[in-house]
Image: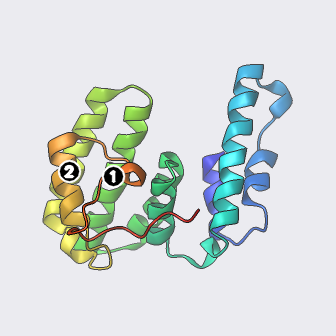
């Protein structure tokens, strides 16, 4: 579902949430799953409404915006597209971002060991290669936070005024 939502956003689909929903067989899902899907659809619709230019955004910008919204799997999908098309140190920096958001996916599922392991790998990759993404000036801070604290939800990240800050989430 998240895969189709992200690709709908990137391809300029006028209703990316509807595209994601159309891929599901809702009737075959248990009621508890249908309720979860309906909740995700609400989040997807709000994201699409608050980010009307998502189709024009780079995979990096879209991935970071999705991460800020707590849409970790969806952020992973967008950042993975950037990783796959990049080369050299830039590719390794994107890989580290994919690992960082992946650590959030594991943490949300309660898999704290894998989350911590992936966060450590991401911290190392960002410390080594984050310089190759100069458009994201706060990566050194993210690397330190990942190393010290594990998975980071950048939407709830406590930025001080002296830090380079990510763009605020649209409301």
Q: Residue 150, located in which quarter of the rendered image?
A: top left
Residue 3 screen position, x and y as percent: 61, 51
Q: Point out the frontmost of discs 2 and 1.
A: 1
**Residue at the spot x=28%, y=59% of the render?**
159
Q: Quadrant of residue 92?
A: bottom left
Label 2 vs 1, first from the N-terminus:
2
Q: Quadrant of the N terminus?
A: top right
User: Badge 2: few (under 14), some or many (20 or more) residues near its Cα, within 10 Å?
Assistant: some
Label 2: element kind: helix
Taking 147 as reference, is 157 left or right? Answer: right
Give how far apart the Cα atoms at labels 2 and 1 are: 10 Å
Residue at mark 1:
157
Which residue is tagged 2?
Answer: 145
Q: Position of residue 115 (x, y in %)?
A: 30, 35
Labels 2 and 1 touching (C-beta < 8 A): yes
Question: As displayed, is residue 72 above or below residue 34?
Answer: below
Q: Nearer the viewer, residue 48 or 8?
A: 48
Q: Splitting the image into 4 quarters, where does residue 143 fall?
A: bottom left
Seen from the viewer's position, the closer of residues 139 and 50 is 50
Q: Secondary structure at mark 1?
A: loop
């Amino acid at each position: 579902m998240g895969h189709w939502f992200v690709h709908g956003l990137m391809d300029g689909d006028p209703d990316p949430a509807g595209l994601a929903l159309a891929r599901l067989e809702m009737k075959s899902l248990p009621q508890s799953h249908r309720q979860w899907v309906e909740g995700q659809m609400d989040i997807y619709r709000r994201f699409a409404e608050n980010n009307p230019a998502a189709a024009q955004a780079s995979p990096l910008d879209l991935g970071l915006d999705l991460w800020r919204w707590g849409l970790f799997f969806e952020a992973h999908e967008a950042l993975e597209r950037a990783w796959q098309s990049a080369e050299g140190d830039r590719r390794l920096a994107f890989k580290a971002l994919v690992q960082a958001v992946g650590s959030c996916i594991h943490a949300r599922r309660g898999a704290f060991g894998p989350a911590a392991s992936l966060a450590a790998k991401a911290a190392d990759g960002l410390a080594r290669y984050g310089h190759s993404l100069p458009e994201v000036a706060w990566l050194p801070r993210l690397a330190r936070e990942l190393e010290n604290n594990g998975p980071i939800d950048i939407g709830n990240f406590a930025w001080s005024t002296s830090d380079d800050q990510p763009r605020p989430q649209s409301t």
